[in-house]
């Protein structure tokens, strides 16, 4: 066995003999563990109210003990470390309410449901000034791929203009994706500019399976709004 393989084996044995760093963190006091792992970022682990209560109690107890130990144990640095961790735990407890977890989104229907739920969540916290623009943008971008997947699914197959339920579903999906970004419109374009947008091979556009005159039966006011929404949705595109 050459020296390189000996080194590899020794490294493997060293790693196997010691727990991972994350495990070492888990073995620390509750307030140390939470202070190290918590955060408003959705990728950070979540902790319950009981977890935070226990961590704060443990930190305050440790802080009292550190002060009691006196100078013989050089507790100044220890007290500061505990106090800093306690402050972080309290900060994270407040941030926990602003954490938003986006579940797996497998299709357009789930995308519409989740983006609408997210919009309500954002509105509530924006009104209460409990969410930063940075966090809102960060979370919104997590919907970008599901939105793109949904648009590609819709824009690569035709829509039956006589199936009102399907048409309105497509409208809802396009409007939902538009809030995330990436959906463009040529509704206000005219002439050559519009022609180029409508025929650009680099664009995907929604289309009807057959020609339609956008006929709508029912209340004239409802029909006027509905036809306008449908036309607006059908005049959108995404880049391939």
Image: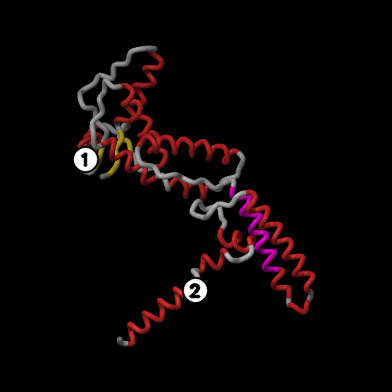
Per the image, the residue denoted by label 1 is 200
Q: Does dot 1 land on a helix, a strand or a loop?
A: loop
* Residue 222 on image: x %, y %: 40, 17
Classify 67 as above or below 175.
Answer: below
Magenta-drawn stretch, dominant element (helix, strand or loop): helix
Question: What is the spatial separation of the Cα atoms under label 2 and label 1, in whole angstroms?
Answer: 59 Å
* Residue 180 on image: x %, y %: 41, 42
User: Image quadrant for the N terminus?
Assistant: bottom left
Q: Does dot 2 land on a helix, a strand or a loop?
A: loop
Q: Residue at x 51, y 65 (%)?
A: 22
Residue 4 is inside the magenta segment:
no
Classify 230 as above or below 27.
Answer: above
* Residue 198 on image: x %, y %: 23, 35
Left or right: 125 as drawn, with respect to 118: right
Mark 2 and mark 1 lie on one chain; the one further toward the N terminus is 2
Left or right: 46 as drawn, with respect to 224: right
- Between 61 and 10, the one nearer to me in the picture: 10
Q: Using the rendered view, name the quadrant where residue 233 is placed.
A: top left
* Residue 116 on image: x %, y %: 46, 35
User: Image quadrant for the C terminus?
Assistant: top left
- Front position among marks 2 and 1: 2
Give neighbour class at mark 1: few <14, some 14-19, many 20+ (Cα, 10 Å).
Answer: few
- Between 36 and 116, the one nearer to me in the picture: 36
Q: Residue at x 66, y 57 (%)?
A: 55
- Between 61 and 99, the one nearer to me in the picture: 61
Residues drawn in magenta: 80-96
Per the image, the residue denoted by label 2 is 18
Left or right: 37 as drawn, with respect to 210: right
Q: Residue at x 22, y 44 (%)?
A: 202
């Amino acid at each position: 066995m050459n020296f390189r393989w000996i080194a590899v084996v020794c490294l493997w044995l060293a790693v196997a003999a010691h727990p991972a760093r994350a495990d070492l963190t888990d073995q620390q006091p509750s307030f140390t563990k939470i202070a190290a792992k918590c955060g408003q970022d959705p990728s950070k682990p979540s902790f319950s109210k009981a977890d935070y209560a226990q961590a704060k109690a443990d930190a305050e107890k440790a802080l009292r003990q550190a002060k009691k130990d006196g100078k013989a144990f050089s507790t100044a640095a220890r007290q500061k470390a505990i106090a800093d961790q306690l402050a972080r735990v309290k900060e994270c407890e407040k941030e926990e309410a602003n954490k938003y977890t986006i579940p797996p989104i497998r299709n357009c229907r789930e995308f519409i449901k989740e983006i609408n739920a997210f919009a309500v969540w954002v509105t509530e916290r924006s009104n209460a000034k409990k969410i930063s623009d940075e966090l809102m943008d960060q979370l919104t971008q997590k919907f970008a791929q599901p939105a793109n997947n949904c648009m590609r699914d819709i824009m690569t197959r035709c829509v039956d203009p006589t199936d009102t339920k399907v048409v309105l579903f497509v409208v809802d999906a396009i409007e939902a994706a538009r809030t995330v970004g990436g959906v463009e419109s040529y509704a206000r374009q005219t002439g050559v500019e519009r022609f180029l947008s409508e025929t650009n091979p680099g664009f995907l556009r929604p289309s009807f399976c057959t020609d339609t005159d956008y006929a709508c039966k029912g209340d004239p006011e409802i029909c006027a709004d509905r036809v306008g929404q449908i036309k607006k949705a059908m005049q959108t595109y995404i880049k391939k």
